[in-house]
């Protein structure tokens, strides 16, 4: 009887010891999981803060571009209103070139400001006078702006210019007379090197990339792979579209454009317009499963 009691006590002690060890393992596992979750939350917040800062910097540049485009748009409409028969000659004048060149000085991040005639030929630009007789009427931005009188600022995919072949992001506005006649386009070209310099601040951060998009989800640039994703689009089902429509925010999705989990931060929409061509900005940071 004494031997049976001792054996039973020993089994109880073994069970208690196993239970204590299991509890310790569980507590340690929960602690490690908690630390991991905290680390992921911290990474998510950090990505959001970086996205917000870079989006604000990008937004300020775009606001300056659009303000310049609107000012030229209004001046050219007034020029046409004053002398419709002399408009084509006036926009090719040395005086207009001097005005373009002086405005470019205030936009050091820009490469050129260009005025296109209604036929799609370069009428004047900031880099020299007289402007070369270059036809860009087949470019996507010109086709869109000529067709749609109600569009705001259009942002085109990066393209090599037909003058310098430098790859640029083109910000454009339609020029429309007070009678509704299409008078051409005024445009600012910004080389992708500007965006590369702007976004180089994230190079030291592992697994972090940044995308510059139109609010319709079209990817204009993706850093650090600036030339590899232009023209791709956010899937229509992505919650990113809802975040941008609200003016900005944060979200987490898996496999946005690549396989594997991703933190995705939609930081800011750069302005509001009836057109979908005003850019948005998103940042994605690779993370482990959550």
Image: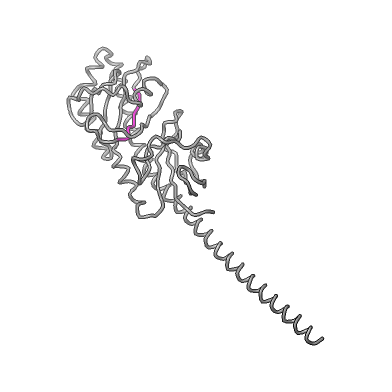
- What's drawn in magenta, residue-wise? 168-174
254 or 183, which is in the foreground?
A: 254
Q: Position of residue 117 (x, y in %)?
A: 28, 20
Quadrant assignment for the N terminus: bottom right
> Which residue is most to the bottom?
2
Count of number-bearing discs: 0
Question: Taking 234 as reference, is 149 above or below it?
Answer: above
Q: Nearer the viewer, residue 118 or 204?
A: 204
Which quadrant holds the C terminus? bottom right
Q: Quadrant of residue 222?
A: top left
Q: Residue at x 32, y 25 (%)?
A: 139
- Residue found 20% across the figure and 22% down from its top: 93
Residue furthest top in the image = 85
Farthest right residue in view: 1
Q: Is residue 23 above or below residue 206?
A: below
Magenta region includes residue 169: yes
Q: Nearer the viewer, residue 262 or 248?
A: 262
Q: Is residue 175 left or right of residue 266?
A: left
242 lies left or right of 78: right
Q: Position of residue 113 (x, y in %)?
A: 26, 31
Residue drawn at 37 percent across, 42 percent down: 58
């Amino acid at each position: 009887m004494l031997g049976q009691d001792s054996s039973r006590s020993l089994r109880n002690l073994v069970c208690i010891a196993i239970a204590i060890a299991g509890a310790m393992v569980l507590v340690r596992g929960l602690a490690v999981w908690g630390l991991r979750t905290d680390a992921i939350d911290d990474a998510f917040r950090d990505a959001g803060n970086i996205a917000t800062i870079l989006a604000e910097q990008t937004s300020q540049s775009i606001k300056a571009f659009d303000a310049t485009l609107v000012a030229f748009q209004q001046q050219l409409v007034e020029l046409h209103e004053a002398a419709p028969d002399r408009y084509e000659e006036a926009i090719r004048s040395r005086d207009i070139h001097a005005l373009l060149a002086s405005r470019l000085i205030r936009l050091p991040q820009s490469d050129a400001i260009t005025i296109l005639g209604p036929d799609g030929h370069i009428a004047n630009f900031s880099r020299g006078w007289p402007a070369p007789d270059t036809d860009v009427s087949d470019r996507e931005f010109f086709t869109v702006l000529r067709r749609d009188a109600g569009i705001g600022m259009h942002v085109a995919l990066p393209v090599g210019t037909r003058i310098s072949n430098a790859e640029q992001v083109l910000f454009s506005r339609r020029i429309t007379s007070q009678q509704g006649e299409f008078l051409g386009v005024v445009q600012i070209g910004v080389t992708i090197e500007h965006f590369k310099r702007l976004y180089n601040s994230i190079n030291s951060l592992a697994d972090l990339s940044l995308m510059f998009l139109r609010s319709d989800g079209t990817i204009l640039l993706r850093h650090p792979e600036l030339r590899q994703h232009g023209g791709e689009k956010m899937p229509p089902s992505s919650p990113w579209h809802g975040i941008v429509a609200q003016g900005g925010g944060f979200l987490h999705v898996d496999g946005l454009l690549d396989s594997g989990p991703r933190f995705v931060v939609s930081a800011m929409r750069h302005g509001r317009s009836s057109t979908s061509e005003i850019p948005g900005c998103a940042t994605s940071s690779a993370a482990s499963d959550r």
